Each structure stands twice: as C-alpha cells, then as structure tokens.
Amino acid sequence: MNRLPHRPRRMRRDDFSRRLMREHVLTANDLIWPVFVHEPAGRVAVPSMPGVERVSVDELLRLAEEACELRIPALALFPVTAPEAKSLDAAAAFDPDGLVQRAVRALKARFPELGVITDVALDPYTAHGQDGLLDDSGYVLNDATVEVLVKQALSHAEAGADVVAPSDMMDGRIGAIRDALEDAGHIHTRILAYAAKYASAFYGPFRDAVGSAGALGKADKTTYQMDPANGDEALREVQHDLDEGADMVMVKPGLPYLDVVRRVKDAFGVPTFAYQVSGEYAMLKAAAGHGWLDERACALEALLAFKRAGADGVLTYYAPQAARWLREG
Ligand code: PBG
C-alpha cells in the first residue's frame, strides 16, 4: 500500500461525511418563477418550452397559489401583448389598466405575501420587437426610451409590484427609475437590475412565447445587450447599476455565464441572481424528451451550480417542478 499524504476520497466514502462537508444547498427559497400572462381566457402551451404555458390573469392566480404552497418566494411576470396593443411609442407599457398592471393588482389582492416582480422593457409593446424607441435609422434611442421605462416602472409600482426589474439595458435607467420611485413615495419598491444581460441566442424560445420573435425578424439587440465575448464589461455594468440605486443585480443567461456570476459576487457581494433562460430550459427538456438526459438529476444539478457560482437565487422555468422535486427529497 502507498502511504499517501492525502486521500480526498475518505470524506466521500460515506453518505454522512458527504453530507457534513456539503458546501451549498438548493431550496425553494432560491427560486423565482417566470410566468407568461396573456389576455385570452385559459392557458396555451408554449411549443418550444414543454411544460410552460401562457396564462390568463385568472389562471395566474392558480399558479400563484401553487407558488405559495411550494414556498417559492416570488413570481416574475412577462406579458404577451396582443398585436393591436403594440405601437411605435409603446404606450401600452405604462397603461394603468394594462395586462401587467391588472395582473399585479390581482396577485397582490389575493396573495399579499407572494413577491411580485415585473419586467421593465418595451419589447412586448413595440411593433418592431426592440426594447426601446427607434430613430429613423432603426437605432434604439437611449434617453427617450428611459423616459418611457420610468413611466412603465412607476405604473408597476403603483399597481403594487414589489420589485421592478429593468431588462432593457439602456444606460442610466436604474438611476432615473430610482429617482422617480423616490419622488412618488415608492420607497419600498426594490429594483432588480438586469445588469449584465448579454445579446444571447438562448432567448429564442422566450421570444416565441411572448410573440416578439416575428416582429424582431432578423434584427438583433447587439447595440444595447452585451457581447458574449466580454467579462470585465459586466463588472462595469453592475457597478453603474449599483451606483444608481439597484438593490439586486442579475446575470443573464445563466449556465454559460457562471464565470460572470462568480466575478460579480466576488467583486460586489450584493444580492446576485442568475436567469436560467428559455433556451437553457428548452435544451434540458429536449434532451430529456429523447431519453438522453435524466431530467430531474440534470435540472437540479444545473440549479445547484448557480448557487455554487455565487448566485443567491435563480429565475427558472423549472421553479415549481424543482420545488416539488426538492420537497420529495
Ligand atoms: C426582454 C426579455 C427577454 C428575456 C427576458 N426579458 C428577451 C430578450 O431580451 O430578447 C429572455 C428570457 C428568456 O429567454 O427566458 N426584455
């Protein structure tokens, strides 16, 4: 026998010592459930996201009940806007009786303890599917877009949203929204900044789900979302958003960007979230559907990996399923 100075396998030998040295744990407290809300009654399946449905406000209340029952802390709402509500000025984004605003009021009336997060961005409301207003050349205007985002965020706060989450990547929007919230007395409204949001091809199924893919066509979002080649830039973006008053920051997409999650957590130590986006979900579902991956094991492993990388929580379409799996143990 060799006399080895180290035998790391000793600690892995038995279940008791594996459990004792386990560093990270995933619980339902780590999950944020993104949901798609639409105007028609009932539910419609999203083909590229098996198990995910667009739901009416009535059905949304059923999902909220499920979230409460599973101890999922919060829902993140994404509207599916009817084509006739889309325009060049995205005015429907800040309609006090818009779909999101009504959904928030209904949720907070029935489930006051459930966190409600709203998406602040114009892509569901613009006829062209970009996250902001365009100039004549098709460039997304920054400051003019921020003015609309401020109105949108205020309308969400007025409806009772607990957290507004700007996912648009315009410059200066966190500061402008924070100022407006303070001025209006919404001092408790949290801002979850999509601080490091990349121009990713992994958003494909989401754009199908909300119906912005067709409007966007071959256009992309590379003049405002970040280049997947960049890491240092993410730290600068996070720094700006924190300086401007963000309470929490997000890295998006998730699994291919765990290095960014780790760097953000190490550099700032603030509440940091990651978004396991639609394409990541679709990949797992597709492979599992073919019988090529063990869905439960792979999904829970991926979610735990976010925790290990430094995320405090994960936005995931797996939220209800993962919470059920975790409960089963
Ligand atoms: C749009 C928005 C997107 C997602 C969340 N908010 C898509 C985009 O930027 O085009 C993607 C989420 C996902 O893929 O699950 N503001």
Image (cartoon, rainbow, N blue to C red):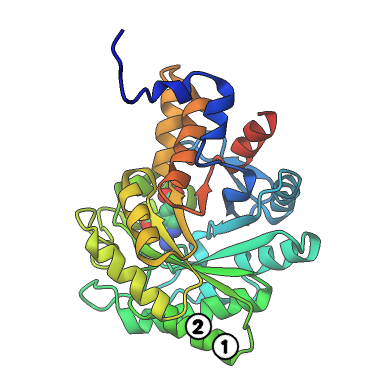
Mark 1: amino acid? Glu
**Residue placed farthest to the top in the image?**
1
Is residue 21 visible in the rendered image? The answer is: yes
Q: Quadrant of ligand 1?
A: bottom left
The residue that label 1 is drawn on is 182
229 lies left or right of 167: left
60 lies left or right of 280: right
Determine crowd level at label 2: few under 14, some 14-19, many 20+ residues with C-alpha closer than 10 A. Answer: many
Q: Are marks 1 and 2 in contact (CB under 8 Å)?
A: yes
Mark 2: amino acid? Arg
Residue 178 at x, y = what percent? 50, 83
Element marked by disc 1: helix
Kindly identify which numbered label has been placed on residue 132: none
224 lies left or right of 241: left
In the image, residue 51 above or below residue 143: above
The residue that label 2 is drawn on is 178
In the image, residue 128 above or below residue 252: below
Residue 224 at x, y = what percent? 28, 67
In the depicted view, which residue is nearer to us: 289 or 82? 289
In the depicted view, which residue is nearer to us: 14 or 124? 14
Residue 326 at x, y = what percent? 63, 34
Q: Quadrant of residue 202?
A: top left
Is residue 207 visible in the rendered image? The answer is: no
Q: Quadrant of the C terminus?
A: top right
- Cα separation between marks 1 and 2: 6 Å
